[in-house]
Structure formats: structure tokens, C-alpha cells
Amino acid sequence: MNAKKNGLAIPSKKNNKAPCILIYDDDAEILFLCKIILSQLNYRVETLQQCNDIISDVKRIMPDIILMDIWIPEIGGEKAVSILKKNQLTNYIPVILFSAHGEVKEISRRVSANGYLEKPFDIKVLKNTIAKNICKD
């Protein structure tokens, strides 16, 4: 059972391993902010500023959820999510698109992402979106 902090589900550490969030964004400040916020909630947070080989990154990091910027350098978030969702080894990993792109909701649907966050995003919405997607009993 997950504990609660300020009304949010806090992940339990199964086998002493904190759930892992992989965040792709080219904005170092967003990565820094997200890492601080989510680390305080007992998540292990890994960050990357570009996406060259999404499958290789996922195999190496083994995330429980991915936050993906649509405009991530190299292949772009839309293509990266499509690759993940078409691969049998990675299609189960929840992916949340986050972007200031005006069509993030439509792009999220088109690539079968598990959800989306519009930038700028509210910190509470960020926390709730993560908890909803990886904190399941």
C-alpha cells in the first residue's frame, strides 16, 4: 500500500528500489526542477537532454515511466514515443508527453502516449500525473 503525502500517493520502495522516472527535455532548468520535486517524493529520476536511441536508453535505465518533450533534440518526442509504443519490449512503459506545443493533446493521442502535460505545467498536476500512472497497488 502506498503512503500519502499532502493527499498524493507516495510510491513504496519495492525491494528497496524506488520507481524510476526518465525525463527527456532539452531545457536544463526544467530537468533540474523536475528532478528536485520528484526526488522528494521517493522517485529515482534520470534525465537526458537529447534522444538518439530511445530503445537503448530505456534498456539501460529501465524506467517505470517516461516524460517526453515533443521537441527533444535528435529524433523528436513524437517519433521517440512511436518507437517505444511499437516495440514489444517497451510498449508497456507509460509515456507522458509534455510540451508548450499547441497540439500536445492531439499528438499525445496520435502516438498512443498515456497522457500529456502542457507547459508551463502546475507542479501539483505533474505530481498527480506521475502518481496516477505509476503508483498502482
Image (spheres, helix red, strand yellow):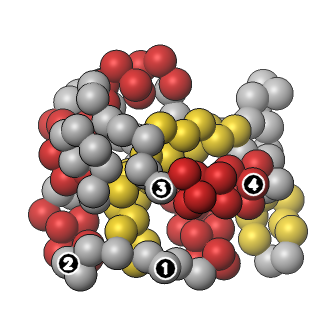
- Label 3 sits on what residue type? Asp
Q: Which residue is identified by label 4? A: 36
Specify whether 123 is left or right of 82: right
Residue 59, percent across and down? Answer: 41, 19
Cα distance between the residues tagged 4 and 1: 17 Å
Q: Residue at x 26, y 74 (%)?
A: 101
From the viewer's perspective, is the residue at label 3 or at label 1 nearer?
A: 3
Report which residue position mark 1 lands on.
Answer: 120
User: Within 10 Å of the Cα at label 3, are there few (<14), some (14-19), or many (20+) other Cα atoms?
Assistant: few
| Amino acid beneath label 4 | Ile
Q: Residues within 10 Å of mark 2 (few under 14, many from 20)?
A: few
Secondary structure under the numbered disc 1 in the rendered image: loop
Disc with the residue nearer the chain's start (1 vs 2): 2
Residue at the image position 66 percent from the left and 78 percent from the top: 124
- Element at label 3: loop
Left or right: 137 in relation to 42: left
Q: In the rendered structure, which disc, 4 or 3, sits on the residue that comes first in sequence? A: 3
Q: What residue is rendered at 52% in x and 78% in y?
A: 121
- Which one is earlier in the sequence, the residue at label 3 or at label 1? 3
